[in-house]
Amino acid sequence: MHGIKSYGERLQFAYTLRGFPKLYALSHRIGVTDSALSRWFRSEPISMENFAKLCVELNVNADWLLLGRGQHSLGAMHDAPHRKALADVIERMADNDVRNLAKFLDEVTTPAT
């Protein structure tokens, strides 16, 4: 996995590894258009809600997908229902609340310097 520099490249890697036959298979599962997924493959902006859905559907570590840190796989599949539940909660949240949650999570997971 050396040489994978952007989140779009990591997304393509995870998509291929997961074995979806066509873009539609993944885009339909997360409720977006194929063109949105194609834009994300080019590392174009993505909402926190859709990013969380991708992590669940592809079974990837969010830190790895976004920043390339750590292991790509979430590992144990028994975590998937919890991640799906979290994605469902985020989907129902107002945009401002999602931004605040993202800011909070960034603050509590960023090491102090």
Image (cartoon, grey):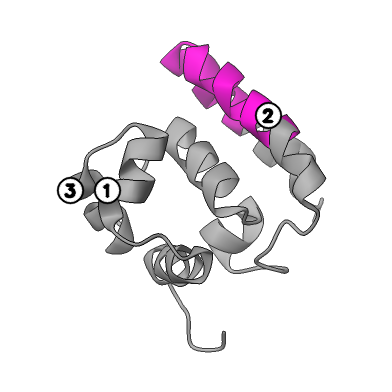
Residue 92 within the magenta-colored segment of the rendering? yes
Within 10 Å of disc 1 (Cα), the crowding (few <14, some 14-19, many 20+) is: some
Amino acid carrying label 2: it is Phe
**Disc number placed over residue 104 in the picture, else none:** 2
74 with respect to 23 (left or right):
right
Secondary-structure class at tag 3: helix
Residue at horizontal 60 percent and vertical 31 percent from the top: 103
> Residue 43, can we see it?
no
Comparing 23 with 21, the one in front is 21
Sequence order check, earlier mark of 3 and 2 = 3
Comparing 109 with 82, the one in front is 82
Residue at horizontal 60 percent and vertical 17 percent from the top: 89
Secondary-structure class at tag 1: helix
Residue at horizontal 34 percent and vertical 31 percent from the top: 31
Between label 1 and label 3, give the one nearer the viewer: 1
Amino acid carrying label 1: it is Tyr
Q: Residue furthest front?
A: 21
Secondary-structure class at tag 2: helix
Within 10 Å of disc 3 (Cα), the crowding (few <14, some 14-19, many 20+) is: few
- For mark 3, what is the residue? 35
60 in relation to 12, above or below: above
Q: What's the CA distance linking mark 1 and mark 2?
A: 33 Å
Sequence order check, earlier mark of 1 and 3 = 1
80 with respect to 58 (left or right):
right
**Disc number placed over residue 24 in the picture, else none:** 1
Amino acid carrying label 3: it is Ser
